Image (cartoon, helix red, strand yellow):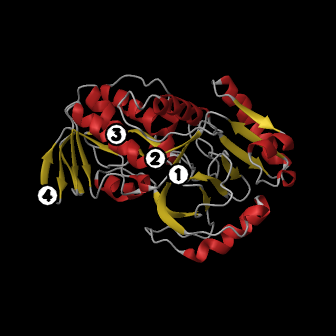
Amino acid sequence: MVGGGALGASVAFHLAEEGVDVLLLEADELASGSSGKPIGGVRAQFSDPANVDLGNRSLELYEDFANRPGADIGLQQPGYLFLLPDADDVALFEESVAMQNERGVASRMLDHDAVRRLNPYVDAGRYAGAAYAARDGFAYPHAVVEGYAAGAERYGGSVRTHVTVTDVETRGDNVVAVRTNQGRVRTGAVVLCTGAWTRELATRAGLDLPVDPCRRQIGFTPPLDPAPPRIPFTIDYGTTFYFHNAEPGGLLLGIADPATPIAFERTYDPGWLPLLRGAIGACAPELVDVPVAGGWAGLYEMTPDHNALIGEANGVPGRVLYAAGFSGHGFLQAPAVGEVVRDLYAGRPPRIDVSGFSADRFAAVSAETTTTSPGRRGPEANII
């Protein structure tokens, strides 16, 4: 196992629980990459059926996390509220909600009065509609990673930090080892859960995984007076501005800056605040002058279609499995993906069909046309 974030730790736990001899290698500390974010959203509201299934199953597993693997992850479920600027967005979400309902997700469309009751900060009249699922919410990624890693060790797995994997060694048709900054480790299989750092290591294994790093930033208010009411994880679908409660008595604020270049840059830059305040003013005018006491920057691991890469490599020597490129929803899908990769490793069909997430979908685009191949997924719409 390579990568000690939420996905790598989940895969390590599920494999170790299955009785597999697991060694998890992390180049830094656990949860030091994209999983290091202070709060991670959990939801099942997506536009793609497989993403819905992964999110819904992960919610089930997060709700049971105190029992298995056994840890307090600070799970809160005030719901996810998507604010939809125009009629086209409403039509898209109506289709998604119908599909989600068919798959067991209790999402629904809301009118302006319902939006105001859920989040009194929102200028509801600015939006054409909204979608909401009460079961969604957020949890603490560090606690999730630590809980899964400790669970893996209880089942006999090993976790080593500050070990950088530099190459995958093959002999004939087999993987025989990985090379690291601390020596060679023999193995018959490798699982890449390396987030934004996936592309280079995958190339060394002979695999093309198109994952690029993109900085995302969040800000925190100090405790507010009066303290905010309990509100959903609220997202302006038009701007990607989002906000929700944060302890003690404040709010977390975020937005994706479309001008952010592809780069391994994780330095917090307050120069994003004018963009943030403009979006706040349009969505929640009462909060436009709220103080931002501090911030955080991390990396999204982006693929061209904003869908994950999950599967076992074809056309390369040996067994190389991968789970990366989740484009902002890796933490929320990590529990279910751990089960999926466990089953792929064991050679049995997973409970959720992830065949459409194979990296092969990017290899079959015709040179004569701009349309995608028949097996390729469309872009995931419900992403921030």
| Marks 3, 4: nearer the viewer | 3
Residue 193 visible in image: yes
Q: Can you tell which of label 2 and label 4 is closer to the viewer?
A: 2
* Sequence-first disc among 2 and 4: 2
Secondary structure type for disc 3: helix
- Is residue 123 found left or right of 329 in the rendered image? right
Residue drawn at 62 percent across, 45 percent down: 380
Q: Which residue is mark 2?
A: 140
In the image, 370 versus 58, the foreground residue is 58
Q: Nearer the viewer, mark 3 or mark 1?
A: 3
| Place of residue 161 in the rendered image (x, y in percent of width and height, measured from the top left) | 23, 53
Task: Find the distance from the CA under tag 1 to the CA under tag 4.
Answer: 31 Å
**Residue 309 coordinates in the image, percent (x, y):** 46, 44
Residue under the point 21% across and 36% down: 157
Q: Position of residue 352 (x, y in %)?
A: 49, 27
Residue under label 4: 182
Disc 2 secondary structure class:
loop
- Disc 1 to disc 2: CB gap under 8 Å: no
Separation of marks 3 and 1 at Cα, in angstroms: 23 Å
The residue located at (52%, 32%) in the rendering is: 59
Give the residue at x 34% y 59%: 200
User: Could you tell which of marks 2 and 3 lies nearer the N-terminus?
Assistant: 2
Give the labeled residue for mark 3.
147
Type of amino acid at the residue the image marks with label 4: Gln
Amino acid type, callout 1: Ser
CA neighbours of label 4 inside 10 A, class few (<14), some (14 to 19), many (20+): few
Which of disc 4 and disc 3 is earlier in sequence?
Answer: 3
Q: CA distance from mark 3 to mark 4?
A: 26 Å
